[in-house]
Amino acid sequence: MIRPRLLFLILCLAPATLVGQVKTGADLLFEKQFKLIEGKRVGLVTNHSALLSNGKHLVDAIHKDKRTKLVALFGPEHGVRGDAPAGAKISNEVDPRTGVPVYSLYGPISKPTDEMLKDVDVLLFDIQDVGVRFYTYIGTLSLAMEAAAEHKIPFVVLDRPNPIRGTWVEGFNRDDSLRFRDGPVPYLAGWQPVVIAEGMTVGELATTYNNEGWLTNGVKASLTVVKMEKWKRTMWYDQTGLKVWVAPSPNLPTLASCVVYPGTCLFEGVNISEGRGTERPFENIGAPFIDGLKWANMLNEYKLKGVKFKPVEFTPRSIEHVAMNPKYEGEKCGGVLIKVTDREVYEPVKVGVYMLASVKELFGDKVRWRQSKINRLSGTPKLTEAIDAGVPPEKIVPMWKDDVDKFKKVRSKHLLY
């Protein structure tokens, strides 16, 4: 018999084990769905996050399995092994561990070409998403699906948890006019019309793209989603029982950074550091002209749910493979550290809007929009127009209610869990 005190310690120390570990689509591919790739030549759109529960990378596991043949790898932003800085264009290469050709989908070519797909019988997608529209990987997902559909190649999504839950729906939808960027490279951070925090998994997004006819020219992929087992929509990543947290991209090193990211990524569109080049990217926000104490006091006076703001000073530095030439490199910045005190009630996009409106009010003309960037991140020019007009944040937040309501109706048709 387990003594009460020992049982208490077990409950405290291992809650995820008692709930049962979530099984990802990648694990279930090998356990139950290998027929999808058996005897076939496989192309794989992936990055460093595609780990199996045994710690092996999916690329290496498929490459070593004699029942199938890995013939092509496709790398999104940051590359197949996830070691390129944000925004860096990725070149075609050969994967040093497997000898398999790697084709870049982040640069002049964002969609697999005829030549890239000529030997592929089935195209897999396995990348850890973070539940946010402007994450470029879900733009890559859409374009890879289109290419598979056009070449009549089956497309398989190996699903993974939304790390910030599958319930969080918030923010403006993307205006159609903001889908493309001038020049030859598509703006992958706003490829499909979804709100900022969409509360879906990649498998659910792929299903939505396909069933809603959102792929270019109305093509429809032969789509299979290998669903997870034991995942619930209310789960945060650290409640899934999955043993290893892999930073989804170099500047999202922790789950805490992912929690604030839907709101503070908006600062990429402002002449204010979003914390790249510090130990807390997207949690540290500031600039040399900001008085952190004054800003923190104003933000704390709003009494926003689940969050406190602490004045900080930080100096961004270039970090190899993480942050090259960050804003205000080598300059001391004043600002705030976002401390989420209750993630269940925290509203990241709302908080981001309050931060933008308050910093503009306090520091006026020193705050400058990177206009095309901020509008594409927010999805609309309405946000900056309202802030510039002095509209208070409590009146800006309700402006996305119609967007959220309409998106929820579409979203509800394609939820898999």
Image (spheres, rainbow, N blue to C red):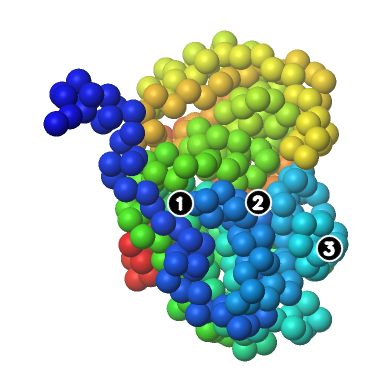
Earlier in the chain: of badge 3 and badge 1, it is 3
Residue at numbered disc 2: 48
What secondary structure is found at the residue carrying circle 2? loop
Q: Residues within 10 Å of mark 2 (few under 14, many from 20)?
A: many
The answer to whether 86 is drawn above or below residue 409 in the figure is above
Q: Residue 156, image x and y in percent?
A: 54, 74
Which numbered circle lies on residue 94? 3
Residue at 79 percent of width and 25 percent of height: 317
Residue at 69 percent of width and 36 percent of height: 270
Residue at 35 percent of width and 71 percent of height: 413
Instruction: Check if mark 1's residue and mark 2's residue have beta carbons within 8 Å.
Output: no
Q: Residues within 10 Å of mark 3 (few under 14, many from 20)?
A: some
Instruction: Specify the quadrant that holds the N terminus.
Output: top left
Q: Residue 16, image x and y in percent?
A: 34, 40
What secondary structure is found at the residue carrying circle 1? loop
Question: Alpha-carbon distance for marks 1 and 2?
Answer: 17 Å
Earlier in the chain: of badge 3 and badge 2, it is 2
Asked whether, in this view, residue 274 is left or right of residue 128, the answer is right
Q: Nearest the camera: 103 or 109? A: 103
Q: Nearest the camera: 270 or 128? A: 128
Instruction: Specify the quadrant that holds the C terminus.
Output: bottom left
Q: Nearest the camera: 109 or 331? A: 109
